[in-house]
Image: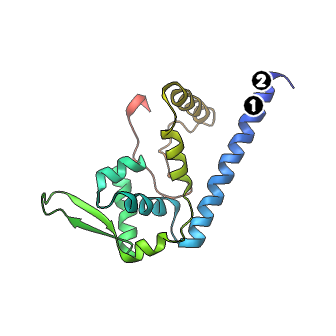
Amino acid sequence: MPSDKRNIADIINNLRRVFQVINEQSKKAEKETGLTGPQLWAIKVIAEFAPIRVSVLAQRMYLHPATVVGILDRLEAREFVTRTRSKEDRRVVEITLTAQGQALLVDAPEVAQGLLVRGLESLQGDKLRKLDEGLYELAKILGAHELPPQLILSPEINAPNKQNGR
């Protein structure tokens, strides 16, 4: 098989693998916890850094704060998290897990988004830039480069990031 054809086959197979893992992890998370992947991911990040501000949670999840607020609204309604005004600065809202939220984590599966973020954060400069450029080209090929980014296997839409013209 010519080199270009082999590269195309490898790219398609790797995309299939990525979709497979994301789909399986998301289904497992929802089946075992009743939460979407983004909701479970938020709980895992809150558990690691609590008490945590909404803005910091959004940064750690690479999401727009408005998107995180929507996720938190649903988690709070199900009594997995609490939001409390800081005693030092009343403008600051801190998020912590409830006992129910902590109990959920005991047997909670890994979340694909968390794996993805940890892996990407471990990449350095040129490798990360090449991956970004390649994925952007793939989005353009599919005509998806101007769509608002929807969270993985979730109806949530992340507010667009205007950096790099994207």
State which quadrant residue 99 falls in.
Answer: bottom left
Left or right placement of residue 131 versus residue 70 in this view: right
Between 75 and 48, the residue placed more toward the observer is 48
Type of colouring = rainbow
Residue at screen point 32% across, 61% down? 50
Q: What element carries label 1?
A: helix
Between 139 and 75, the residue placed more toward the observer is 75
Q: Eyeballing the image, is 12 above or below 81?
A: above
Q: Is mark 2 on a helix, strand or loop?
A: helix
Q: What is the three-letter code of the residue carrying label 2? A: Asp
Residue at screen point 54% across, 43% down? 119
State which quadrant residue 112 falls in.
Answer: bottom right
- Residue 43 location, x and y as percent? 42, 63
Q: How far apart are marks 2 and 1 (CA)?
A: 6 Å
Between 160 and 116, the residue placed more toward the observer is 116
Which numbered dot is residue 8?
Answer: 1
Q: Eyeballing the image, is 12 above or below 100?
A: above
Total residue callouts: 2
Q: Mark 2 points at which residue?
A: 4
- Residue 155 location, x and y as percent? 50, 58
Residues packed near mark 1 inside 10 Å, few (<14), some (14 to 19) or many (20 plus) = few
Q: Are marks 2 and 1 in contact (CB under 8 Å)?
A: yes
Residue at screen point 44% across, 33% down? 166
Q: What is the three-letter code of the residue carrying label 1? A: Ile
- Residue 131 location, x and y as percent? 57, 31
Left or right placement of residue 135 versus residue 157 in this view: right
Residues packed near mark 2 inside 10 Å, few (<14), some (14 to 19) or many (20 plus) = few
Residue at screen point 39% across, 39% down? 161
Name the quadrant of the N terminus.
top right
- Residue 45 location, x and y as percent? 41, 57
